[in-house]
Structures are given as C-alpha cells and as structure tokens.
C-alpha cells in the first residue's frame, strides 16, 4: 500500500497571487495513497478513469468528467479503480477562501460550508476549473486569476453547497484537539502512546478509539500527515530536501521520501521542482 506507481505523472502549481491555493494534476493506474486528510478543501475534476473512495464511512465512485468535493480534515484515499488509468486535477483551497465566499453568498458565518454530495456532474464548473488551472500555469494577470477563482468558488457554493452549521460539541472533541495540539507542538519528538494518554488523561485504548473516531486517522498517521504538511511548506520555500527531512521530524531523507510518497503520491523533488508551464 502506498507504493509509488512506475507510471505516475504528477505536477503541482503554487501561485503567490493566490495564497492558500495549490493545484495538482496526477495520472495513476494503481494504488498510490494512504488514507489521509487535508486541512484544505479539495475540489477536483476526474479527467480519465474512475476512483472509489470513502468519506464518513460511505463509499463514493467518481468517473471521467465528474467533480469531487472533499471537506477539510475528511479522511480519504482517492486511488484509481483496478484496471483504470486515472488522471485528475485537484485544487486544494484553504477554508478561509470558502468561508469568506459563503459569507458573501449566504450571510455572515464562521462555520465552513459543506458539500452534501461529494460527487457531482457540472460541465460548466469543470470548464472553469480547467481555465483557472491554465491561467495559473501561464502566469496570467492577478486580476484574471482572482476573477476565475472567485467565480469558481461562487458557482461551486451556489450549486452544490449549503451553509455550514455550528456543530454541537461532543465528548471526544476536546480530546481530539488536545492530541492534535500535542502532536503539532512536538513534531520533531519521538512521541509515545503513553505521552498522548497522559496529555489527554485517558487510557491508551480509549484514547485510540476517541481519536480515530474524531480525526479519521490513528495518531501515528495524523503525526505523519503533520510532518508531510510541514515538509511541503519547507520544500515550497526551496529548502534542501535533506534539511527539510530533519526539520519535519523524519529520521533521514530516505524516511522522509518514503512517507511523503505515501501521503502525496509524489516524491519531495517532484513537489519542489514543479514550475509554471502549460496546464
């Protein structure tokens, strides 16, 4: 699980004119990802092939021409179905963009909007995604890129989303946040399960059950996710891969590369070396 497919093609775009937005285009014909989460919204277009993925315990299938919506911190692994060559474009967008746009459309709110249907058909929105990706790749004027992004988000929210609702606090939310904070604050440390149990004031078994239910991942997988996310930020700054590996809490560059591939479907150098060009 999580091996790097030999035919994988991966490209990333990051644009300083659109902070908090990252685009990737990927092609795979076999499993490439571990179950993982993103702090951002994921809005994607399946160009070829098909995938089956699970959200909130429910499997969903998306195929060529369909759009996929995945909310922040929803555990998923969008791998191609067997015998399916899948190509897709995915926009990772920080929640602040969608919260601000939802406030303009639905009225002031601090609650992130949600997409009830993770898979939809919307050719017009798909075309806007492709046009925006092309504008980013070709380094179009900032006004053009911002216009396309705002139009894409407004169309997505108007046609496929609903206003967010404040959630009632559950008994496990505080525990999950405590553990997330502890892991983030000790990213370079060798954290033990006993350390987490003491931080949450729970037994180890109870801690694992509560965290898995609330975060969608076990603590060690969430820790790896945090380390990979930090690695991505440092790589985007142009830092050497070996230096990034150690600062992100990995034993060495080889360990970093293995884990990075499992969670992103790309090598650290593929991610760092993505440059503007045709989408």
Image: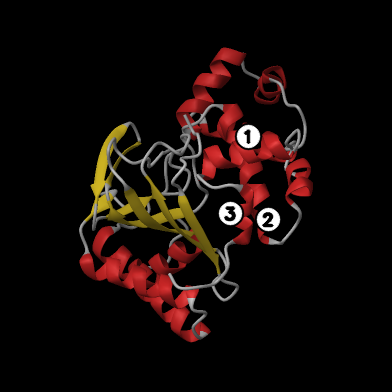
Label 2 neighbourhood size at 10 Å, few (<14), some (14-19), many (20+)? many
Element on which disc 3 rests: helix
Label 3 neighbourhood size at 10 Å, few (<14), some (14-19), many (20+)? some
| 197 over 7 or under it: above or below | above
In primary-sequence order, the first of circles 2 and 1 is: 1
Numbered circles on residues, count: 3
| Residue found 42% across the figure and 43% down from its top | 167
| Residue found 46% across the figure and 38% down from its top | 33
Where residue 41 sits in the image (x, y, percent)?
44, 54
> Gap in Å between the C-alphas at discs 1 and 3?
22 Å
| 55 over 164 or under it: above or below | above
**Quarter occupied by the C terminus:** bottom left
In this rendered view, identify the residue nearer to me: 245 or 82: 82
Q: Disc 1 designates what residue?
A: 223
Where residue 62 sits in the image (x, y, percent)?
25, 47
In primary-sequence order, the first of circles 2 and 3 is: 2
> Gap in Å between the C-alphas at discs 2 and 3?
10 Å
Q: Disc 3 designates what residue?
A: 270
Q: Most extreme residue toward the front, as rendered?
A: 6
Element on which disc 2 rests: helix
In primary-sequence order, the first of circles 1 and 3 is: 1
Q: Is any atom of residue 171 visible in this view?
A: yes
Which colour assignment does the render follow? secondary structure
In this rendered view, identify the residue nearer to me: 153 or 268: 268
Q: Disc 2 designates what residue?
A: 235
The answer to whether residue 50 is left or right of residue 30 is left
The answer to whether residue 119 is left or right of residue 186 is left
In this rendered view, identify the residue nearer to me: 82 or 188: 82
Which callout, 1 or 3, points to the residue nearer the camera?
A: 3
**Quarter assignment of residue 256:** top right
Label 1 neighbourhood size at 10 Å, few (<14), some (14-19), many (20+)? many
Which callout, 2 or 3, points to the residue nearer the camera?
A: 3
């Amino acid at each position: 699980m999580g091996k790097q497919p030999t035919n994988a093609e991966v490209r990333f775009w990051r644009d300083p004119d659109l902070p908090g937005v990252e685009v990737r285009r990927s092609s795979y014909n076999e499993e490439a990802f571990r179950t993982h989460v993103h702090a951002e919204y994921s809005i994607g277009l399946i160009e070829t092939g098909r995938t089956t993925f699970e959200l909130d315990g429910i499997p969903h299938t998306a195929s060529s021409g369909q759009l996929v919506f995945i909310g922040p911190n929803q555990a998923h692994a969008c791998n191609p179905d067997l015998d399916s060559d899948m190509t897709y474009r995915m926009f990772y967008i920080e929640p602040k963009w969608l919260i601000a746009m939802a406030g303009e459309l639905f009225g002031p709110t601090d609650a992130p909007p949600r997409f009830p249907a993770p898979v939809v058909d919307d050719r017009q929105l798909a075309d806007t995604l492709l046009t925006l990706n092309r504008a980013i790749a070709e380094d179009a004027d900032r006004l053009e890129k911002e216009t396309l992004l705002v139009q894409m988000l407004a169309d997505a929210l108007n046609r496929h989303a609903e206003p967010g609702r404040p959630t009632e606090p559950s008994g496990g939310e505080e525990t999950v946040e405590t553990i997330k904070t502890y892991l983030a604050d000790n990213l370079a440390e060798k954290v033990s399960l006993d350390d987490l149990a003491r931080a949450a004031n729970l037994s180890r078994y109870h801690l694992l059950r509560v965290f898995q239910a609330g975060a969608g991942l076990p603590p060690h997988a969430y820790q790896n996710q945090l380390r990979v996310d930090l690695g991505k930020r440092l790589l985007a700054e142009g830092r050497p891969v070996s230096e990034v590996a150690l600062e992100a809490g990995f034993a060495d560059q080889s360990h970093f590369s293995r884990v990075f591939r499992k969670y992103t479907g790309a090598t650290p150098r593929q991610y760092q070396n993505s440059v503007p060009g045709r989408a």
